Image (cartoon, rainbow, N blue to C red):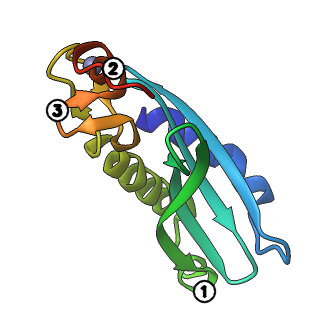
Amino acid sequence: MRRQVQEWITDLLEGFYPKDEERDFNLKLEWKHGQLESYIRITKDKVAFGYGAIQWHGPHSPVSTKIEKYSLDWKELELENDKSEVLLDYMMKTINCRKRQYRSCQFCQKKFPPEHRFDSKTCHVCASNEYFVVY
Ligand SMILES: [Zn+2]
């Protein structure tokens, strides 16, 4: 996965400079437990790193959201000799942080993200099958 992120960053670096308008570069990665979404956001002053998740606005209204994990000033980044290495490290830290949030379901044994959690050991799908919870 690291290699895939590295290639993505290499491509990204060509258009990588401060922007007046906030701009997101999104990266989707296939993981054995599902798709992982992460992004780099650049603004005039900062470079931020985060991941995509789902927020529930009521039981039937999932909303995609972005959660920022780290941010760097452009000034800090400019001082680095190897920008791609720095970006890669932050991206990997962000992605690994997201992976660590996943838990195994006690019924289906699949790993699921916190937003699909009925409780710490049960995913939504199994909660509706096993406990007759309706979503
Ligand atoms: Zn399950």
Residue 108, compared with residue 36, is above or below; it is above
- Furthest-right residue in view? 20
Which residue is tagged 2? 128
Residue 25, compared with residue 18, is above or below; it is above
Task: Indicate which quadrant contains ligand 1.
Answer: top left
Which residue is tagged 1? 75
Residue at the image point whose x is 85% and y is 78% from the top: 20
SS of the residue at dot 1?
helix
Which residue is tagged 3? 121
Residue at the image point whose x is 58% and y is 34% from the top: 28
**Label 2: how many Cα within 10 Å (few below 14, some 14–19, many 20+):** some
- Give coordinates of residue 94: x percent, y percent: 41, 54
- Give coordinates of residue 99: x percent, y percent: 32, 41
State the CA–CA distance, disc 3 to disc 2.
Answer: 14 Å
Residue type beneath disc 1 = Lys
Residue type beneath disc 2 = Ser
- In the picture, the quarter occupied by the C terminus is top left
Q: How many marks?
A: 3
- Give coordinates of residue 111: x percent, y percent: 28, 26
State the CA–CA distance, disc 1 to disc 2.
Answer: 50 Å
Q: Mark 1 touching mark 3, by CB under 8 A?
A: no
SS of the residue at dot 2?
helix
State the CA–CA distance, disc 1 to disc 3.
Answer: 43 Å
Residue at the image point whose x is 29% and y is 35% from the top: 118
Of tags 3 and 2, the one toward the viewer is: 2
